[in-house]
Amino acid sequence: MSTVAIVGAGPAGLKTAAHLAKEGIDVTVLEEHEKVGEPCNCSGLISVEGAKKADLPLDDCLIGKITGAKLFAPNNAMLVVQRNTAVAKVVDRAKLDQLLAKEAQKFGANIRSKSRLIDIRNETLFLESSGRGEILKSKIVVGADGPSSKVRNLMGIEAGMNDFIHSYQVRAEGVFDPNFVELYFGGFAVNFFAWVVPESKSVAKVGLGCKTGLNPKNQFEAFLKAKQMELYDRFEEKSFLIPCRKPLNSLVAQNKLLVGDAAFQTKATTGGGIVTSSLAGKLAAETIREHLFEKKKLENYNKKLDWLNKELNMHWKIHNYYTKLNDNQVNKLFEKAKKAKVEELLSDYGNMDFPTQFIPKLVSNPRVIFFLPDVLQFWRS
């Protein structure tokens, strides 16, 4: 018997577990894979500011530091956003998850590997554990089981293929600027972008996301050829789904609730979700504690998420606006941005995780007169 069962040992599930265990609540984390953190479907890029808010131990799994980003239009026009100090860090994502698991265990959480959820009926979870059927009793179930969430499905929350971006990524040798992330918009990265996240001068994770229905590997190879980007040895390759839609209206059903990718708590602009999922995990744990000790409703979780959903909605608004543009319109947007010196504005005010902190400053700046029709179109999107 467990008071809370958490399905999925990623940052969302592990942060939820740590906060609950810290309160003395009996919690079991179920991870279907043999080892926490593997396989890893992530670029490992996390903002410094976001990591502080979410209390993530980046320095203990650090690979590199990023001071800026180079943004490329389909015609190769470039915008450069940079600061004097690191704005993001590249981490060993598997190691990060393992550190979060140790933190949860330190507070008393029980983490079980090779334990796959099959079904939930009231307070009974049916599992496949190390190849054998098993039953686990739990008062509350937290679905932190990723994009293809079994818990979400059992809650009756439908997700279509249009709610995801299909991506392909390789880790490879090449020649890279270790201080800058590169983002390529338009072209073969339909409805998303391609990226280069450097680990060093000679190694980077290079990938592409596109709308579902297209083959992301084919789109990726076509992108490399079009940009004449040469990669040498490829150490690993991954294809995975990135949740990309507006926040769900409700993440609670009976004794079940969702966090992380399962809850679509990812940023539609970048596909990143480690910071937002970790913050949501804290709110989920707070809700569960209040439910167990103060008899408050689990549905209060939806209200607690209002401020985070405001940020996620802004990410979605940006993404939705961008996907309506064709390549020529994106090229013109970059041209206007250059004239308006948007690079300076983004360098001063930009924030990877919390766009509501800088979007109003950006659109109210006198320089953005160049963008007046675009701004109106953005707010209507």
Image: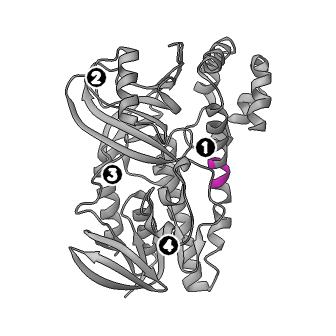
Figure check: 340 above or below 156? above
Figure check: 47 above or below 125? above
Q: Nearer the viewer, mark 4 or mark 3?
A: 4
Q: Quadrant of the C terminus?
A: top right
- Inspect the image, locate mark 4, and give the three-letter code of the amino acid beneath it: Leu
Q: Nearer the viewer, residue 13 or 238?
A: 238
> Along the polypeptide, which appears first: circle 1 or circle 4?
4
Relative side of 281 to 127, left or right:
right
Name the residue that disc number 4 marks: 154
Q: Residues within 10 Å of mark 2 (few under 14, many from 20)?
A: few
Answer with the quarter of the image where residue 179 lies: top left
Q: Position of residue 220 (x, y in %)?
A: 38, 29
Answer with the quarter of the image where residue 236 lies: top left
Calculate the distance from the C-alpha at mark 3 to the C-alpha at mark 1.
Answer: 22 Å
The stretch in magenta equals 308-312
Taking the spot 65% from the left edge, 15% from the top edge, the residue there is 332
- Inspect the image, locate mark 1, and give the three-letter code of the amino acid beneath it: Phe
Q: Nearer the viewer, residue 151 or 111?
A: 151
Taking the spot 29% from the left edge, 57% from the top edge, the residue there is 98
- Inspect the image, locate mark 3, and give the three-letter code of the amino acid beneath it: Leu
Judged from the image, the secondary structure of the residue bearing numbered disc 2 is loop
Q: Position of residue 209 (x, y in %)?
A: 45, 36
> Along the polypeptide, which appears first: circle 2 or circle 3?
3
Q: Residues within 10 Å of mark 1 (few under 14, many from 20)?
A: some
Name the residue that disc number 1 marks: 354
